[in-house]
Image (spheres, rainbow, N blue to C red):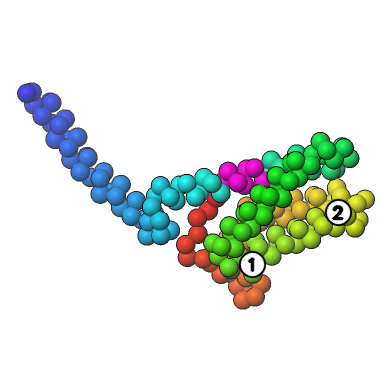
Amino acid sequence: MTQSKENDQKYASKNKMMEEPARSSRKRGKQEEFGMSETRFWIRRLSKTGLRALHITGIAMASAGILYQVESYQWQIWWVLAMATGVLMMISEILSSKLWLIQLKGVLTFVKLGLLASFVIIPENKPALFATILILSVFIAHGPAGLRHYSIWHRRRIDEKKHVKG
């Protein structure tokens, strides 16, 4: 065996030994952080993301029909999809953390539902109500954690220790 091949093998062996502890350390980190295996973490994370994607699709399709006064039979299935996935996401959040109910992200979700219900009471304001719901949704989803996790009960940010994002 040539000197070059020997050095390559030593280098590869040394790198492999250095990578394995780092990899298992990362894996342990996820298990310790979320109390589940990395596989389960990813399944849960991707499931939540998929549910959210279906929810947004349902909202987009139903809102087009509602706002442009299309016959309801053409968008009702999208409405059902939006409401069903919304309920599932709320249940998931509440089961994951009861704090969700008093954090702004939970409270504003109920405000959005109230605004949505007002479509029936003041139908002439549907476009403005929908725009308000949309803006609140962006703040809930993309606002800083200090805003989303602010507790209206405690009057300060309250964080959950173990929470899988999605």
Within 10 Å of disc 1 (Cα), the crowding (few <14, some 14-19, many 20+) is: some
Q: Position of residue 119 (x, y in %)?
A: 86, 53
Please tell me whether mark 1 sits on a helix, a strand or a loop.
Answer: helix
Which residue, given by chain and number where applicable, does mark 2 sit on? 119
Q: Which residues are magenta?
A: 49-55
| Rendered view: 65 above or below 41 | above
Query: Looking at the picture, how far across and down is residue 135, in whole percent?
Result: 74, 52
Give me the residue at 76% from left, 45% from top.
Answer: 79
Name the disc covering residue 13, or none: none
Side of 75 where 142 appears, left or right:
left
Q: State how far apart marks 1 and 2 are (Cα).
A: 24 Å
Q: Let me know if residue 59 appears in the view.
A: no
Residue type at mark 2: give it: Phe
> Where is residue 146 shown, x and y percent of the image?
59, 64
Q: Which residue is mark 1?
A: 101
Residue shown at the point (56%, 49%) measured from the top left:
48
Farthest left residue in view: 1
- The three-letter code of the residue at mark 1 reads Leu
Residue 14 image position (x, y, % from top left): 18, 40
Say whether residue 55 is left or right of residue 113.
left
Q: Quadrant of residue 158?
A: bottom right
